[in-house]
Image (tube, rainbow, N blue to C red):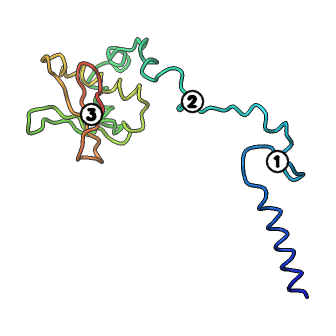
Amino acid sequence: MRFFTSLLVLFGTLLVFAQNPVQAESKPWIWSWWPSHWRNLDFKPYLGNQVISQRSLWDNDRWTPEDWIKDAGDARRVMRDFYAYDIISDQYVDDDNIPVLEVGETYMRLSGLDRRRVLQFVDHVFGITKGSDDGMFYVYYRELDDDPLGVYNKYGLQQY
């Protein structure tokens, strides 16, 4: 008799909870949220429903590499700091005679705007894109030596 009573209570509990699926809407019974709780829930995340594209936010940026040079005193000091803070880890010329800039972990943590500024500064110091019409350099992340992050040319960083 006790077994049947336990089975009946278990079956009744399952029946009560099974009839109420988990959904974001008001529920018709007393153990749920009140109906006014479900009003004005029109949240839209910014990334999925953006109004302004990220690149257009940079269009009116008045920053120039000369600003960093003026703040630090000279370009060598800025480049030395890039190496010291692991923003840049190496630079060399590959087998095809194309310059390569190898960036470190700190570079990967920078915002998109600051990444663009670092590459623009390096290009300003070494004059790679101004040296020829097709001037460019590869950007590699030190931890991922296989594929470059992109190519920097006169149009900016072209990511792969």
* Pair 3/1: label in front: 1
Picture disc at residue 150: 3
Residue depicted at 51% across the width and 20% down the height: 52
Residue named by callout 2: 46
Q: Residues within 10 Å of mark 3 (few under 14, many from 20)?
A: some
3D distance between C-alphas at marks 3 and 1: 52 Å
Residue depicted at 8% across the width and 33% down the height: 97
Dot 3 lies on which element? Answer: strand
User: Which label's residue is closer to the chain start, 1 or 2?
Assistant: 1
User: Which label's residue is closer to the chain start, 2 or 3?
Assistant: 2
Query: Between 129 and 89, which is closer to the camera in this rendering?
Result: 129
Dot 2 lies on which element? Answer: loop
Dot 1 lies on which element? Answer: loop
Picture disc at residue 27: 1
Amino acid carrying label 2: it is Tyr
Left or right: where does residue 2 sit relative to residue 81? right
Query: Between 85 and 123, which is closer to the camera in this rendering?
Result: 123
x and y percentages locating residue 42 in the rendered image = 69, 31
